[in-house]
Amino acid sequence: MTIRIALYQPDIPQNAGTVLRLCACLGIEAHIIEPAGFPTSDRAFRRAGMDYLDAVKLVRHLSWLEFTAWRRREGARLALFTTRASVSYLDYKFATGDVLLFGRESAGVPEEVHAAADARLLIPLRPGLRSLNVATAAAMAAGEALRQTGGIGQASTTPGRPLSTT
């Protein structure tokens, strides 16, 4: 199992679609923690331009509590990406099976979710700038986590060949 990306109650369908495309292309399991700010059916994602939906393993959780129960069963560490953190994601030691969690674009995550994280990580930005787009942050975090865990080496370097999802 490689790393996983989870979106907490996403509210912009195009961003969620971009993250799902990232997951499809890199062989990363994607999790949506509902309720989302838009319909999360396959049809809704396809309408948002998510033509890679068939290539991503997508797990939907009806609530934070359901996601928490799943994570406990899996024994997965939770790394929350937040502007309220003090540890850079570049200084964190990722492990296979980690879940990289990203909050709502409009509001982040509530305190309950923040407190439940095993690690709270930030992507360092220039002073005075608030945050990155969630899809951009997810791509940066996934790249570093895959680099550290060896997941990137599973990707084909030959153009036109699909990624390994094993």
Image (tube, rainbow, N blue to C red):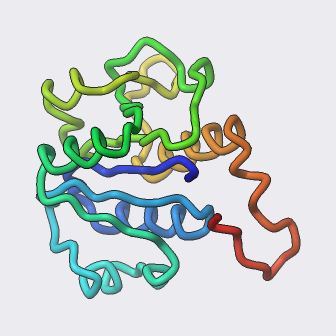
Q: Residue furthest top?
A: 86
Q: Which residue is painted at 46% across and 84% down in the image?
A: 54
Q: Is residue 57 above or below residue 73?
A: below
Residue 61 place in picture, x, y as percent: 20, 58
Q: Is residue 128 above or below residue 30?
A: above
Viewer-closest of 114 and 132? 114
Residue 139 place in picture, x, y as percent: 55, 49
Count of picture labels = 0
Residue 95 place in picture, x, y as percent: 57, 34
Q: Is residue 163 above or below residue 81?
A: below
Q: From the viewer's perspective, is 130 left or right of 60?
A: right
Residue 118 place in picture, x, y as percent: 36, 23
Q: From the viewer's perspective, is 60 left or right of 120?
A: left
Q: Which residue is painted at 72% across and 77% down in the image?
A: 162
Q: Residue furthest right?
A: 158
* Quadrant in the picture for the C terminus: bottom right
Occupied quadrant, residue 68: top left
Q: Which residue is painted at 16% across and 57% down in the image?
A: 34
Q: Which residue is painted at 35% across and 62% down in the image?
A: 16
